[in-house]
Amino acid sequence: HEPTNRLVLSAEVGNAPEASRPRTMQALLAFNLMWAETDCVRAAMSPVDSGTILIADLFLPDMTDERLERAVLRLKDSARSWRDFVSGDLAAPVDAPDALMIRV
């Protein structure tokens, strides 16, 4: 195993209900196509349980405290929006308490 100079953040955003999986998968593919506009954040869906996650790679040679903070906040905001989309609850308030977990 070769060491890398990157930090990978991931955020679980929920499981897509069966009825909305095709719509969710289409949206995830479109989102991944915009990787340059999303600071290389990408999304994936588990084929086992339809769990959706966002993934962000941060390259350590260029890392500062401010960049790390911005990346975590961007991922958190994006994960909230995706959570609402994936669950089908598009009317959920943005500042609602959540169980969002960001894995480092």
Image (spheres, rainbow, N blue to C red):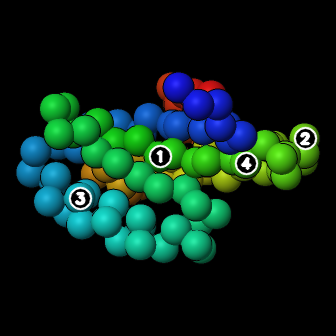
Q: Is residue 57 above or below residue 102?
A: below
Q: Amino acid at mark 4?
A: Phe
Which residue is identified by label 1? Answer: 54
Q: Residue at coordinates 47% horizontally, 56% vertically from top-left? A: 42
For marks 3 and 1 on the same chain, the one whose residue lies earlier in the sequence: 3
Residue denoted by label 4: 59
Q: CA distance from mark 3 to mark 2?
A: 34 Å
> Disc 2 and disc 4: Cα gap in Å?
13 Å
- The answer to whether the residue labelled 2 contacts the one labelled 4, judged by CB atoms less than 8 Å apart, is no
The residue sitting at the left extreme is 19
Residue 81 in sight in this render: yes
Residue at the spot 10% in from the left edge and 44% down from the top edge: 18
**Which amino acid type is shown beneath numbered disc 3?**
Met
Please give the label number shown on residue 25.
3
Circle 4 packing at 10 Å, graded few (<14), some (14-19), many (20+), is few
Residue 23: x and y in percent read 20, 63
Indicate which label's residue lies in the foreground, 3 or 2. 2
Quadrant occupied by the C terminus: top right
